[in-house]
Structure formats: structure tokens, C-alpha cells
Image (cartoon, rainbow, N blue to C red):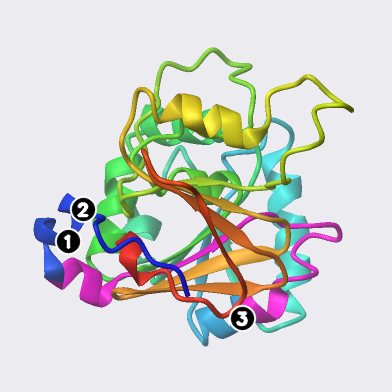
Amino acid sequence: MPTFPNLICPFLSLNARILDIMRLLLLSNSGKPLYHWCKKEIADFVGDKEVTFISAATVYDPKKYYQNAKSNLKEVGVKLNHLNLENPQDLISKTPVFLVAGGNTYQLLNKLETHGLLNKIRERVLAGASYIGVSAGANITGPNILTTNDWNVMGSTIFEGLNLVPFNINPHYNAPQDKVLTSAESRDERISEYHLFETNPVVVLEEQTFLTIDGNKVQVGEKGKVKVFIKNKKPKEFKVGDRLDFIL
């Protein structure tokens, strides 16, 4: 398996103890019906714990989104509690597992920061709560959200993420298309542009693909591939079952 032995990351020196307890499940997409492809993985990750569901990323009806998720995950024994942004404190402080759902990444980050929840969620995860992020929910786990595919339709000026991991996520990845067929910039080219301004790695996930982070172990799961972009290095592809521990 290819590695990047020269990668040096300040995240490890921040607090090695934090890595020992960190548990994250970062999924590229939710699919239709909602979570149909990853229900078992979510249930296995959650175990018998209750889950705090955060629907703040949707620009439509968050309650309807929650009810849909609640119904679908109930089939595999997962119990969801919906986070009320207006009165969230008690639930967050008691949360053993967060499930931060997909939608618009700018909307999600803006809502959490506006309600003073971003640092509270981060502190809770660093204290031992597990974290499931789907698409937008995965995007916000890194240093910033500048590699999201979403449009900033609400004109948010908030870009800093949860800083739970030292890399950015880019979900819904498609390999570059033939330039004969399109002159549009590929995802790879846009990530290269990002690295003209930022230094942290970017991990792209194909559909129906996820990363599990358990302490200092990172593994690719489900069906697709991931590609890791590190500044000034040729990107590398990894398949299901491969370990990406070096990225931490």
C-alpha cells in the first residue's frame, strides 16, 4: 500500500491522548432511500447508544429530514434524538454519539456557529463522544470547509471547521473527465488550486465510501475508492480495506 512517509502533521503533537479516544465515521453520501447503503455500518458504529441527530445542514425542512432518518435507522435499532438548535445545551452535554447529516456545508457551519454549538460539539467529541458525519457533516470535521462542493448560497463568512482531523474531506468524488468532452475544471484541478493557498491534505471519497477513524487508525470502508492529495505530491488512490493512518 502506498504511503507518504514524509508527512509531518502538528495534529499528533497537539494531544496524543485525544487520538486514543477519537471515534469518527465519515461517509461520502446518504443515498436514497436515506442511509440505505450504510444503515448497518451506522448501527455497528453506534452499538446500543442513543444518537443526537443534527439536521442543520438542510436548507429545506429539518424536522421532516429528521423524521425520515429516524424511521430508516429505526429499522436497524438506532434511536435518534433531534437536536433543537434553540435549546441544545442539555442534549449536547449528554450526547454519546453525534450524527451530523448532509445538506449544504455552509448552511451547517453557519447554523452551528451562530448558535454557539461548534466548539461545544468539538469539546464533547474530544471528551469521548463518537461522531458520524455524512457529506456536509463529514466536511466540517477538518480545518476548514473550503473544499466542499456546495454553493455558498447564504453568503456565509464562516469557513473554519471542527478541526477534529488534520485533513479536509471532499465527498461525492468523480474521477476527472476527458478534456475532449468537457472544458470544465476537474475536482483534482480545484484541489490543486486549494493547495496554492493551504497546506493541509485533502481526502476525496467516492460515493458509498467512508472512512473510520478509531484512535490513530484510519481505514477505508464500503464500495468505492479514496484519493489522498498532499501538497507538492502526486495524489494516491486507496481501496476498501486500506489503512490511511499516515494522514493523522
Give how far across and how far down residue 184 sits, in percent.
75, 21
27 lies left or right of 16: right
Q: Residues within 10 Å of mark 3 (few under 14, many from 20)?
A: some
Looking at the picture, how far across and down is residue 89, in whole percent?
A: 34, 50
Residue 39, magenta (yes or no): yes
Task: Please state the horizontal and vertical placement of residue 101, each as a whole percent of the image.
Answer: 60, 51
Tag 1 residue: 12
Contact (Cβ within 8 Å) of mark 2 with mark 1: yes
Instruction: Write down the residue under mark 3.
Output: 43
The residue that label 2 is drawn on is 9
Q: CA distance from mark 2 to mark 1?
A: 6 Å
The kind of residue on which mark 2 rests is Cys
Q: Is residue 156 magenta?
A: no
- Helix, strand or loop at disc 1? helix
Crowding near the residue tagged with mark 2, few <14, some 14–19, many ≥20 C-alpha atoms within 10 Å: some
Of tags 3 and 2, which is closer to the observer?
2
- Report the disc number at residue 205: none
Which numbered disc, 3 or 1, marks the residue that appears first in the sequence?
1
- Residue 12, image x, y percentages: 17, 61
Three-letter code, disc 3: Ala
Could you tell me which residue is drawn at 45 percent across and 34 percent down?
A: 145
In the figure, residue 159 lies in which quadrant? Answer: top left
In this view, the residue in front, 121 or 232, is 232
Q: Which residues are magenta?
A: 17-41
Q: Secondary structure at mark 2?
A: loop
Q: Nearer the viewer, residue 182 or 48?
A: 182
* Distance from Cα at disc 3 to Cα at disc 1: 29 Å
| Mark positioned earlier in the residue sequence (3 or 2) | 2
Q: Residue at x 22, y 76 (%)?
A: 20
Dot 3 and dot 1 residues touching (CB under 8 Å): no
